[in-house]
Amino acid sequence: MMQATPAFRFFVFGIFYAAASLAFALLTRDGVFDHLLSSLAVGTRVPVQMFTLFCIVLVFALLRAKRRKQETVAMVALQITLAYLGVAALNFGFTLFKTGMPALLPYFADPLLADLDAWLHGGTDAWRLVDDTLGSDVARQILPVYQGPWLLLAFLFPVLLVATDDDSARVSRFLTLYCAAWVLIGNLLALAGLSVGPIYYDRLLGTSRFTELQQMLDTQGVDQIFLGQVQEFLWRMYRSGKHALGTGISAFPSVHVSVAFTVTLYCLERSALLVLPGLAFAASILLLSVWSGYHYAIDGYVSILAMLGLWGWQHRRARRPNGIPSQTVADAAARETQGS
C-alpha cells in the first residue's frame, strides 16, 4: 500500500517537520512570511535547477519502470514525486528552524570550539593544516565540489534513492539517515553548540584570531565567487535580522559533512565500485568545509561519528540479539514449518 512506502513516510515527516518549524518561527520572530516571500522573489535559480534535474530523474525512472514492468508507471511517478516534495518540505522546515535558533540562544560556543579544535590538531587551527597539506591553489581548484555536487546530492539524494534502489528496507534506512543529517545534526545538536564558525568568528566577537584565514581566502579570490558571496549574504541577513530560504548561520556540527557522509555510507552499502568515490566525496567536503572557513574540523568529526553511530544502530536493530539477521530467522522458520 502507498502509505507503507518509504517515500510516503518521508513525505509525511517532511510536512509535519515543516509545520512544526513554521510554528516555531512564528513564535520566535516577526515578519516571517514577508521575509520568505521576498526571498522567493529573488532566489529562484537553485530551485529551478533542482526541479529540472528532478524531471530528468523522473523520466529515467519511468522508462526504467516501463522496461522492467515491476511496478506501474503511475506508482513510480507518485513515489518519486513524494520524495521530491518531502525534500522541499524538509528544507523549508530546516531553514525556518535554523534561522530562529539565535532567538533561543546566543552564539556562545565559538571560543570553546576554536580552542578545542586547535588542541586536537596540535595547537594549530585546522584550516592551516588543510591549506598546508593541499595548498591554497589546489583547494581553490576543487572548491566547486563543495557547491555543485554537494548541492545536487543534498537536494536530490532521496529522489535518487527512490528512483534507483529496489531494496525498500535500505531506502527506508537511508531516508531516515538523511532526515537525521538535517534535523538531528543541523537543529538539535546545533543548539547544543550554537556557533558561527571561523569565517564569522572575528565579526561576532570583535577579535582578530582568524584574520589570516580571511586574508588567504581573499588572496584566492573566494570573495569573488559564489561561495564567498553566499558567506557575505548570510552575514548580512543575520545582522539585519532578516530571514530567507537557505539562510541561517550554524557551524557545529556540520550539515555539509553529515549529508555527504550519509551519501558515503550509502555508497559503501550499494556497490564496491562506489566505495572510493563515496569516500573521496566525504573527505573533500570535510576538508573544504574547513579550508573555506565555514566549519571547525571538529564540526565534521562530530557529524561523521553521529551518522556512523546511527548507521550502526540501524544495522543492529535489523538483527536479532544473537546477531542472526531477521530474514534468515524467518527463512529458517519457514523451512522448519514445511518440513513438519
Image (cartoon, helix red, strand yellow):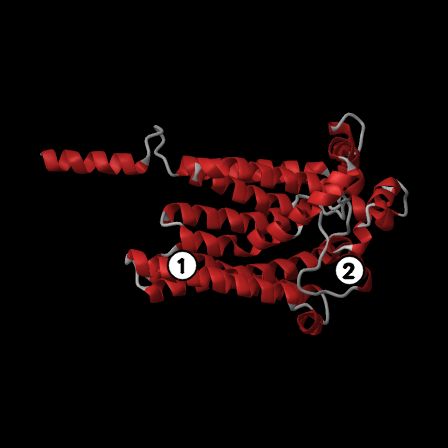
**Residue beneath disc 1:** 61
Say if mark 1 contacts mark 2, CB within 8 Å.
no
- Please state if 277 lies on the left or on the right of 170 as rendered: right
Q: Residues within 10 Å of mark 1 (few under 14, many from 20)?
A: many
**Residue beneath disc 2:** 233
What amino acid type is highlighted by mark number 2? Phe
Place of residue 292 in the rendered image (x, y in percent of width and height, measured from the top left): 75, 45
Up-down relation of residue 152 to residue 305 (above or below): below
Place of residue 106 in the rendered image (x, y in percent of width and height, measured from the top left): 77, 52
Describe the element under mark 1 as helix, strand or loop. Answer: helix
Place of residue 221 in the rendered image (x, y in percent of width and height, measured from the top left): 82, 50
> Which of 31/50 is in front?
50
Up-down relation of residue 229 to residue 23 (above or below): above
What amino acid type is highlighted by mark number 1? Ala
Q: Measuring 10% from the left and 33% from the top, which residue is drawn there? A: 339
Q: Residues within 10 Å of mark 2 (few under 14, many from 20)?
A: few
Name the image quarter holding the N terminus.
Answer: bottom left
- Please state if 82 lies on the left or on the right of 68 as rendered: right
Describe the element under mark 2 as helix, strand or loop. Answer: helix
